[in-house]
Image: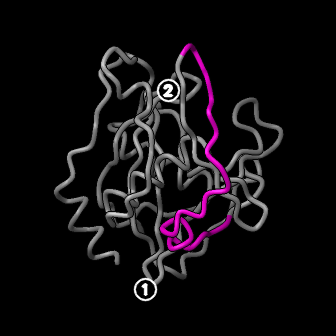
Amino acid sequence: MLELLRRRLADYRPRRLLSERPNASVLIALTDEVEPHVILTRRASHLSTHRGEVAFPGGKQDDTDPDLLYTALREAQEEIGLEPGLVEVLGPLGQVMSKHQLQVTPWVGIVPQDVMLTPSPAELESLFRVPLSFFMEDRRQRTDIVRFRGMTHYVPAYEYNGYVIWGLTAYMLVELLNVGFDAGIPMKPRPEHEPGGY
C-alpha cells in the first residue's frame, strides 16, 4: 500500500495557490506497516485558534525556516516529539487556504510504526492514530456546507472513537486517498481552487 503511495506521489504535481498570504505547513504522517495508520492530534482547549479541533502536526512558517518542508518537520518535532530524521518524506499535496487566511502546504511522510511520540501539553490535548482504511471506506458521518468570506466550502466530517475529523484536515486526507490510492471519494473543489479564487 505504501509502495503505491510512494510511486504516485513521486509523479504528482500538486496544485499551488498564487497568493501573497502567510504560509503554513502540516505533516501527514503515516505509519510504516501493512495497514498504515495516520497520526492526528487534538489541539488544546486553551489555544486562541482552532482550539479542541483535530489537526495534523503543523503551523505557520517562521522567518528562520528555510522552506515549507522544514516548517512541517519542525512543527511535528515541537508538537509531538517526532524526530525529523525518522520521517521518510514522500512529497507535498495541493495547497489550501485556512479560514485564518494561511496558505497551507501538506507534506506526506512515513514514520516507523513503533515510533514513540509525546504530545506537547502547551499545544495539544491528545494524540491518536486512525487506520487509513477507515477513510478509504469513506465512512464519513456527514458533509457540511460551510459559507465563509462569501465562498461555499463542502467539508467532509468523520467520527472515530469520539474524535471529529473535518475541515482542512479531512479535505487533505481525501486528496491523499484519491491521489495515492484511486479511492474515488467525491469531493467538491475548494473555492480557492476555482478561477478567481484567492
Taking the spot 31% from the left edge, 57% from the top edge, the residue there is: 179
Is residue 80 rendered to the left or right of residue 47?
left
The structure residue drawn at horizontal position 26% and vertical position 73%, both measured from the top left corner, is 4
Q: Position of residue 22 (x, y in %)?
A: 45, 22
Q: Which residues are magenta?
A: 128-150
Return the residue nearer the eye: 163 or 138: 138
| SS at circle 2 | loop
Q: Residue placed at 70% from the left, 36% from the top? A: 50
Q: Which residue is mark 1?
A: 34
Residue 169 drawn in magenta? no
The alpha-carbon separation of the residues under discs 1 and 2 comes to 34 Å
Q: Is residue 100 above or below residue 188?
A: above
User: Where is residue 106 shown, x and y percent of the image?
Assistant: 42, 46
- Lower position in the chain sequence, tag 1 or tag 2: 1
Q: Residue at x 48, y 68 (%)?
A: 136
Please tell me how crowded label 1 is: few (under 14), some (14-19), or many (20+) other residues with Cα within 10 Å.
Answer: few
What is the quadrant of residue 109 in the picture?
A: bottom left
Q: Quadrant of the C terminus?
A: top left
Amino acid type of the residue tagged 1 in the rendering: Val
Q: Picture coordinates of residue 140 (x, y %)?
A: 61, 57
Residue identified by numbered label 2? 102
Give the left or right position of residue 115, taking residue 64 as reference. right
Q: Which color mode does the image show? A: one colour
148 above or below 153? Answer: above
Crowd around label 2: few <14 · some 14–19 · many ≥20 (10 Å) = many
Q: The N terminus is located in which quarter?
A: bottom left
Rendering coords of residue 150 (x, y %): 55, 13
